[in-house]
Image (spheres, helix red, strand yellow):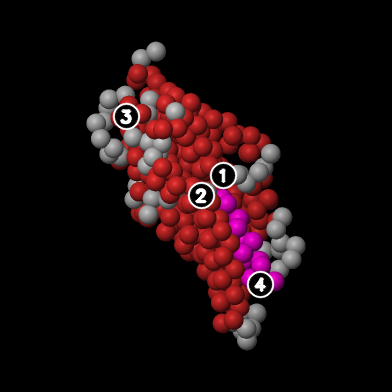
Amino acid sequence: MTISVWLLILIILALVFDFLNGFNDSGGIAATIISSRSLKARTALTITALAGFAGPFIFGVAVAKTIGMGIAAIHFFTIQILIAAVLSATVWSIITWVYGIPSSSSHALIGGLIGALVVSCGVKVLITKGIVVIIIALLFSPLAGLFFGWLVMKIIYRQLRNATPRANVFFKIGQIPTTIALAAANGANDSQKTIGLITLGLITTGYEQHFFVPLWVIVICAVAKSLGSFIGGWSVIRTVGTKFYKIKPIHSFTSQLSASLVIITSSIFGGPVSSTQVLSMSVIGAGAGSGCRK
């Protein structure tokens, strides 16, 4: 098998992973606005897909650089290591989709990459600083989503304590820009992980000499994820949108705004996060801030 064929396999697997990632994440992103009955499901998923495509072009490729240069020195990577990482993460994504579980494709992909590296080269090749940054981003971003969801809801409730029910109109309309922001943030962070892997694949097979992300790599990864988002994950919509508590427009607005702030900030600084976990925790935080119970 020639090197070029290995690269083609990597690209195909990465695009399948991106598609499945979008398929699962679109349900989580669109769940709150659908469950609050502010938009129809197909409209929400269309908005999610378009905004998600634009995300990597808006917020840059800092996360891709973290994946490509923050875990281990580039010369330790091989095309087989990259394929093993994407394949393991793809299998996990399929399992979670079958059972309708909101899951972290980010954890699966990064864990698969680190695991393949350790098996092939040993623990010593890992960059401690980079691994710590990644772990902090993955572990603390959901907690940040929980906190900001709670905090923003408390602030809104305090400011609107004397408001009439007509205030719901603002939140119903306001969910549209927050949905767009959240989808763009999700696209920016999640697509960059496979963008980083494909770029590493280009380097390991000699097509690139340095870590430079070609435009076509950004485009194909964004398209794959957006296509998955458009088709949507209906089982995940039901899980995130209905199993916590009865979501109203104010909860949807607050949770999406909070999650967007966390994910966008992480994307700008190159921190890979699980958008699904951040949003789910933001939903819980918003509910706690308003005193909701299921």
Q: Residue at x 66, y 36 (%)?
A: 98
Q: Which residue is mark 1?
A: 104
Q: Which residue is mark 2?
A: 138
Disc 4, SS: loop
The CA distance from mark 1 to mark 3 is 28 Å
Tell whether label 3 touches label 4 (CB within 8 Å). no
What residue type is disc 4 on? Ser
The CA distance from mark 4 to mark 2 is 26 Å
Tell whether label 1 touches label 2 (CB within 8 Å). yes
Which mark, by number, is residue 236?
none
Disc 2, SS: helix
Query: Which one is earlier in the sequence, the residue at label 3 or at label 2?
Result: 3
- Looking at the rendered image, the quarter that the C terminus falls into is bottom right
Query: Which one is earlier in the sequence, the residue at label 4 or at label 2?
Result: 2
Mark 1 vs mark 3, foreground winner is: 3
**Residue 166 in the image: above or below residue 13:** below
Q: Residue at x 45, y 32 (%)?
A: 123
Q: Residue at x 62, y 61 (%)?
A: 283
Residue 219 percent across, percent down from the top left? 36, 41
Q: Which residue is mark 3?
A: 75
